[in-house]
Image (cartoon, grey):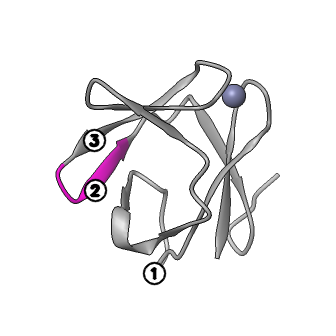
Amino acid sequence: MLTIKCAKCKQKLFKYHKIGIGRVLHCWKNKIKNDNTIRKDGAVFCTCGNRIGIEMGNYIKMDQSAFIYSGTKQKG
Ligand SMILES: [Zn+2]
């Protein structure tokens, strides 16, 4: 499991069960756990107001500059 965090305030946004390697470009909603995000007008926000992605049906298209993650894929 990856822990997805806000790049601005470092708050935990949700846990994500990622399959395979590579960057987190989008997050399937059915693999998200412990979701602390706010959904508004089709976008996904941290509680600090930072927009972390856009809702696209059954997944979230993630904004690459808006979040960080830790877990099995952590680098540098
Ligand atoms: Zn935040």
- Residue on which the image places disc 2: 59
Number of residue marks = 3
Q: Choose mark 1 or mark 2, whichever is in front.
A: 2
Mark 1 vs 3, N-terminal side:
1
Q: Depth-wise, is mark 1 or mark 3 nearer the camera? A: 3
Residue bearing the label numbered 3: 55
Disc 1 element: loop
The image shows residue 53 at horizontal and vertical percentages of 40, 35
Disc 3 to disc 2, C-alpha distance: 6 Å
Q: Reading the chain from its start, which is encountered first: label 1 or label 2?
A: 1
Q: Residue at x 48, y 65 (%)?
A: 22
How packed is label 3: few (under 14 Cα within 10 Å), some, or many (20 or more)?
some
Q: Residue furthest top?
A: 49
Q: Disc 2 residue type?
A: Tyr
For disc 1, the marked residue is: 20
Residue at 47% x, 56% y is 24
Q: Amino acid at mark 1?
A: Gly
Q: Dot 1 surroundings within 10 Å: few (below 14), some, or many (20 or more)?
A: few
Left/right of residue 3 with respect to residue 19 in the rendered view: right
Helix, strand or loop status at disc 2: strand
Q: Please identify the dominant SS of the magenta region.
A: strand
- Residue 8 in the image: state x and y as whole percent: 73, 24
Mark 1 → mark 3, Cα distance in angstroms: 22 Å
Question: Label for residue 30?
Answer: none
Report the residue at 36% width, 72% height from top: 30
Find the distance from the CA under tag 1 to the CA under tag 2. 17 Å
Q: Residue at x 55, y 42 (%)?
A: 37
- From which residue to which does the magenta span run? 57-61
Q: Regarding ligand 1, which quadrant of the image does it lie in? A: top right
Q: Position of residue 64 (x, y in %)?
A: 49, 36
Is 73 magenta? The answer is: no
Packing grade of label 2 (10 A; few <14, some 14-19, many >=20) is some
